Amino acid sequence: MTIPKETLWELEPHTKAKHEILGRYLAAWFPILSTYNKRIVYIDGFSGPGRYKKGEKGSPLIALDVAVSHLKPIGGEVVFWFIEENEDRIKHLRQELASRTVPSHFKIISDSGKFHEKFGEVLKSIDTGKNTLAPTFAFIDPFGFSGIPFSLIERLMKYERCEAFITFMADAMNRFLEHPEDKLVQHIVDAFGTNEAVLIAKGSGDRVAKLRELYQSRLQQAAKYVRYFEMHDRLNHPQYYLFFATNHELGHLKMKEAMWKVDPDGDFRFSDATNPNQLVLFETNTTSMLIEQLRKEFCGKGQITGFAVRTFVEDKTAFLKKHMTAALKQEEDAAKVLVDPLKTDGKKRRVNSYPDEAKLTWV
Ligand SMILES: C[S@@+](CC[C@H](N)C(=O)[O-])C[C@H]1O[C@@H](n2cnc3c(N)ncnc32)[C@H](O)[C@@H]1O
C-alpha cells in the first residue's frame, strides 16, 4: 500500500470494510457504556481529515454520526478526541466538525500532533493521580508502524473498560525489519515493546505470520480478550490486520457481532485469524468449521454442559451463539452429540434448544 501524500485520498475497499466494522461496533459500544458511566471517551489517535476524496466519511465523522443518530439517546458525556499530526488534514477535519451540530453533552477535541505524545501526556497525568481515565475506546489507525508504542496500549488496557482497535501493518514491518536506519527499526521495537520482533528477521519461516503472532501474544499479556482480523484486497492478498483488545466479554461479543454483520461486497475479504489454524472467512458456510472446533475441544470429555459450550464459543472462537445452536443441531441430528432429555436443573429440555443447563456428550 502506498502512503497518500495529499490531504484527502481515495477510499479503498478494505478501508470501507474497516469503517463498517468500526461503525457497527460503536453503535453497540456507545449506548452500553454510556448507560453505566457518566463519561465515556472515543479516541481516534490517527484521525485523518474526516473525509475521503469522493466525499465519503472518515472515521471521525463515522463515530460522531453513530453517536448522534443512535435510536437510543446516548446519555452522559461523550468525549471525542481526535489527534492528527498533518496540519492540512487536521484543518480539514476541523472544518468538517465546525459544520456539524452535536448535542451539548458531546465534547469534541481536535488536537494537532502525534498520538503517542498527546495520549502519553494524558496517561502521565492520570498515573500521577491528577485525573482518571473514563471508559475509553481507542482507535489506532496509522498508515505504517511508527508512533504506536506498545507501552501506551499496555497502560491503556490497565484501566477498567478500556479497549483498543488497532491497524497493524505486519507486512510493512517485515519490509523494514532489517533497515539500516536504526530509528526506523526502533519504531518496530517500540510497537512490540520488545526487540523479539527484530530477532524474527534472523530466523527462517513466514516472518509476517511470526510478527502477527508476536503482536497477538503481546496483546494477550495486556488484555483478556484479543481478536484479530485479516483484511485482504480483491485478489485475496492480505493487506493488514485489525487487532481488537478488551478486558470485557461483552465488548468481545459485540465486536464479533459487528464482524458477522459486515456485508462483503466482493471488493474486499476479511477473516477472523485469531486462531491461525482456523481462518474464519465471514462469508462462507462456517457451521462445519465450528463443529470441527467443538469436536476438538469436547470429544472424549464425557458429559458437559451447554454453559461450557457457550462460553467456549463466545470467548475462544470467532463464532456467536446462533452459530453454536446451528452446529449443535447438526451434530445432534447426525447422532454425534447426545443430549440428555433432562437439564441440570431437573427440568425437561426443549427439542433443538441448547441452553446453559443442557447436558451434552460428544460420541
Ligand atoms: C490511515 S490514516 C487515518 C484514517 C482515518 N482513521 C480514517 O479511518 O478515516 C492515518 C492518519 O494518521 C496521520 N498520522 C501519521 N502519523 C501520526 C501520528 N504519529 N499521530 C497522529 N496522526 C498521525 C496521517 O497524517 C493520516 O492522516
Image (cartoon, rainbow, N blue to C red):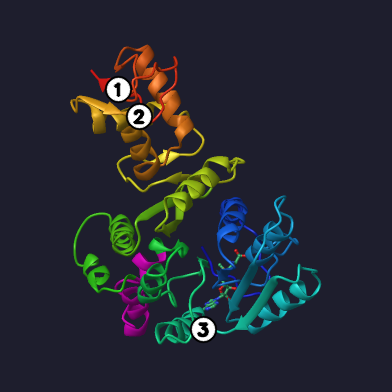
Q: Please, which residue is most extreme toward the front here? A: 346
Seen in the image, is 153 located left or right of residue 54? left
Quarter, ligand 1:
bottom right
Relative image position of residue 335 (x, y in whole percent): 31, 12
Q: Earlier in the sequence, mark 1 or mark 3?
A: 3
Mark 1–mark 2 distance (CA, rounded to whole Å)? 7 Å
Mark 1–mark 3 distance (CA, rounded to whole Å)? 52 Å
Relative image position of residue 187 (x, y in whole percent): 37, 78
Q: Amino acid at mark 1?
A: Leu
When the figure is inspected, residue 362 is found, relative to residue 213, above or below; the finding is above
Say if mark 1 contacts mark 2, CB within 8 Å: yes
Magenta residues (range): 172-191
Q: Amino acid at mark 2?
A: Gly
Residue drawn 71% across and 56% down? 73
Q: Earlier in the sequence, mark 3 or mark 2?
A: 3
Residue drawn 44% across and 50% down? 252
Mark 1 C-beta to ligand 1 under 8 Å: no
Residue 7 appears in the figure? no
Which marked residue is nearer to the observer: mark 3 or mark 2? 2
Residue 169 appears in the figure? yes
Seen in the image, is 315 located left or right of residue 64? left
When the figure is inspected, residue 3 is found, relative to residue 298, above or below; the finding is below
Q: Which residue is disc 3 drawn over? A: 118
Question: Is disc 1 placed on a helix, strand or loop?
Answer: strand
When the figure is inspected, residue 156 is found, relative to residue 256, above or below; the finding is below
Mark 3 C-beta to ligand 1 under 8 Å: yes
Mark 3–mark 2 distance (CA, rounded to whole Å)? 46 Å
Quarter where residue 168 is shown: bottom left
Q: Which residue is disc 1 drawn over? A: 360
Q: Tag count in the figure?
A: 3
- Determine if the magenta segment contains residue 257: no
